[in-house]
Amino acid sequence: MPQEADNRSGQFEARPDGLLVRAPAKINLALLVAGKRADGYHELKTIMAKIDWMDELFFQSGSREGIDLICTGPCWAPQGPENLVYRACRMLGERAGVSLGIRVTLRKNIPAGTGLGSASSDAAAALLGLDRFLKLKSVDSTIYDIACRLGSDVPFFLNGPVALCSGRGEKIQKITGPVNFSAILVVPNVSVSTKRVYENYTHDQKLFNTLWSPINAAFEKKKIDLAAEMCANMLQTSCFQLHSDLAHLKDRIERVCRRNACLSGSGSSMFVLFNACDAKIQTCRRDLERNLGIPCRVVNINRW
């Protein structure tokens, strides 16, 4: 369920002409597949963390009835009903029984197909933002239900900033206590289809059992850093079978940084974890950019 408003003050910014809502990306500190369910989805156990790289949504009153969605920024996104922002606004408006006349400008900074959950985060931000902009005062269960219908990762972005997500990803156990990290995020110009990665995935129950035991123990002891250090992502093999260039990229990152490079989600982004405020991180980032020719950014855990 959504957090209290005072814990999310950094997400919303009231402006004279509208409401700005920030939509943070995420990385998967661990991603395990427990098997395939009867409904065709895969059962997941994943620790997700929001990071301080964001898309932005700006809500304004529209000049006519309906949803006017404008997409700007360095990354492409659809501007019609196929966009999750549009669908989220339409579904919440229908559930609230109100006629919408809004203009939403989505600044797309985070590319799709990179395992960073940007479309899901945009959808969650749209639900929370529209509810606040129109003062709908929707109950948490309504927003959560719509989020589940929009996508498996969307409910996580109503919560956080770090959580163990299970089921299809919609069952959220918020992680309390200190969780702090920095990371170098490498985002190659490769768009990975999550659908294809899951279709190509071959389940290994023994591997799941081997990985889940220490990760669950770390979770119960609130030692998330120990779980993250394992760099466990059971979708990695499937992703690399489809995109061998990403496997080569991972090797190159690890040679430069002399640390594990972890795949986020179904790919294509990878990250290298550091302790917060580690002075070596900027040197490593510069070395990576020089060796890979790919822009790399330093990110930190988001606080809401």
Image (cartoon, helix red, strand yellow):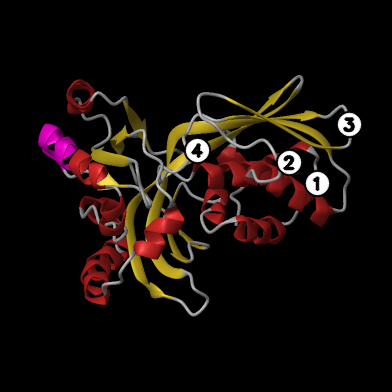
Q: Where is residue 229 in the image (x, y as percent from the top left)?
A: 21, 51
Q: Is mark 4 on a helix, strand or loop?
A: strand
Magenta region, residue range: 251-259
Q: For the residue carrying disc 2, how many other residues have a C-alpha within 10 Å: few (<14), some (14-19), or many (20+)?
A: many
The residue shown at (25%, 40%) is: 273
Q: Mark 1 points at which residue?
A: 136
**Mark 4 lies on residue:** 24
Residue occupying the point 17% across, 24% down: 291
Amino acid at pointer 3: Arg
Q: Are marks 2 and 1 in contact (CB under 8 Å)?
A: yes
| Spatial CA span between label 3 and label 1 | 20 Å
Question: Could you say where residue 269 lies in the image, as x and y percent from the top left?
Answer: 34, 41
Q: How far apart are marks 4 and 1 (CA)?
A: 23 Å
Badge 3 crowding class, 10 Å Cα cut-off, few under 14, some 14 to 19, many 20 or more, is few
Secondary structure of the residue carrying tag 2 is helix
Q: What is the spatial separation of the Cα atoms under label 3 and label 2, in whole angstroms?
A: 17 Å
The numbered disc on residue 64 is 3
